[in-house]
Amino acid sequence: MMRCLRHFFLVSLIVAVGNRPQAASLKVAPARFIVHNVEPGRLYDVYQDTGLPLTIFNDDEATATWLLSTHRPSERGRWEKGYSEIPDARWFWFENSQITIGPHRKAYAKMYLKVPDGEKYCNQHWVVTLGIGSPPGPGGIALAVDVRAQIETKSKGDVRVRPDGLLGLRPSTVCFAEARSGTTDKTEAVLYNNDETTHTYTITSLQNHGELESKVYLSHSYEAIPEARWMEHENAVRIPPGSSALLPLVLKIPGDAAGFGKKWEDILFVQPDQGLAGFLRVQVNPRKSARAEATGGEY
């Protein structure tokens, strides 16, 4: 199933030509969105599969035409920590390269996504920049907005090839499916160094990064784990080029944990000594007691 987290906020730009304001503005929503569980080899109609439209508003008195394009973030835009650039921006495209909108109206830009088939494209976290802009006006001035699409491909633990990218994780999401308070649960992931040099990888929780917004990362219906220390893991791992290492994870939820019964999630960033970070999504799904399972009640 393809899921999407929506961030609906508007971006508005107004420019001036000479001493006279140019009667043009650009509003787009959402300004950022996440698409989860993308299967390599499958064609997605983003609106049909997620219910997410990319909406462009024309609040002006005149008809406006906007140009639509996709880019790797290094060419245009920026991206969040833990994500890497989509290998090819052409994997994400608009149905039409331009759209014309009448005054005080809005329109929807249809988007499509297809990641090439291949197990190496599972367990990936990418960003692609969606560019919406006007043709250059007087003096070469143009309005433009960049929308960030965070794409997470299917998490798969039994792939037979190394994940794509300099840093790889298998799987990209681990789940404690029947967590209990007052007990110890264990699982593991594999970290790959696909680079040509040895790297030391530092592993930290999202909760240790106060500069980052948790809503940018957390999955729908999950809350941030109350205490990062409940998830024990190595603080640093050194891996030679072309090699891999196990990342053991130990979950210890106190017996008196407040709010037990909620679905919790943590993001573990994996930062090499040189290069871009990746991240491991860790989900905690509490196990119901026998009584709760029988009655449909609380945990």
Image (cartoon, helix red, strand yellow):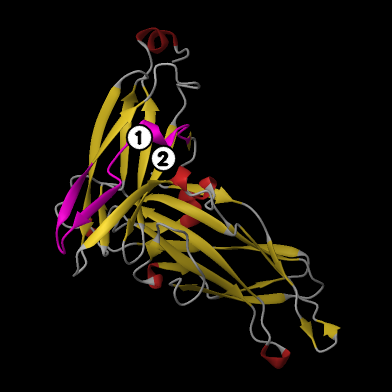
What residue is at 77 percent from the left and 66 percent from the top?
A: 59
In this view, 263 is above or below 266: above
Q: Which residues are magenta?
A: 224-247
**Against 263, is 150 above or below?**
below
The one of 83 and 155 positioned closer to us in this rendering: 83
Image location of residue 79, percent across then percent down: 47, 64
Hey, what amino acid is under mark 2? Asp
Of helix, strand and loop, which one carries label 2? strand
Q: Residue at x 43, y 72 (%)?
A: 72
Residue at mark 2: 266
Given the image, on which type of amino acid does mark 1 rest?
Answer: Met
Horizontal and vertical percent for residue 108? 61, 61
> Which of the image's four quarters has the C terminus?
top left
The Cα atoms of the two marked residues, 1 and 2, are separated by: 9 Å
> Which of the two discs, 1 and 2, sits closer to the camera?
1
Find disc 1 in the rendering and name its residue. 231
Residue 167, position as x, y percentages in the image: 27, 60
Residue 53: image quadrant is bottom right
Task: Please tell me which residue lies in front, 107 or 85.
Answer: 85
Query: What residue sits 80% from the left and 77% below the top?
Result: 23
Q: Residue furthest right?
A: 20
Asked if residue 118 shows in the view, the reply is no
Mark sitting on residue 295: none
Q: Can residue 157 be seen in the rendering of this structure? A: yes
Circles 1, 2 touching at the beta carbon (< 8 Å): yes
Vertical side of 246 occupied by 77: above or below: below
**Quarter of the image where one finds residue 276:** bottom left
* Quarter location, residue 101: bottom right
Is residue 246 covered in magenta? yes
* Image spot of residue 144 (x, y percent): 63, 75
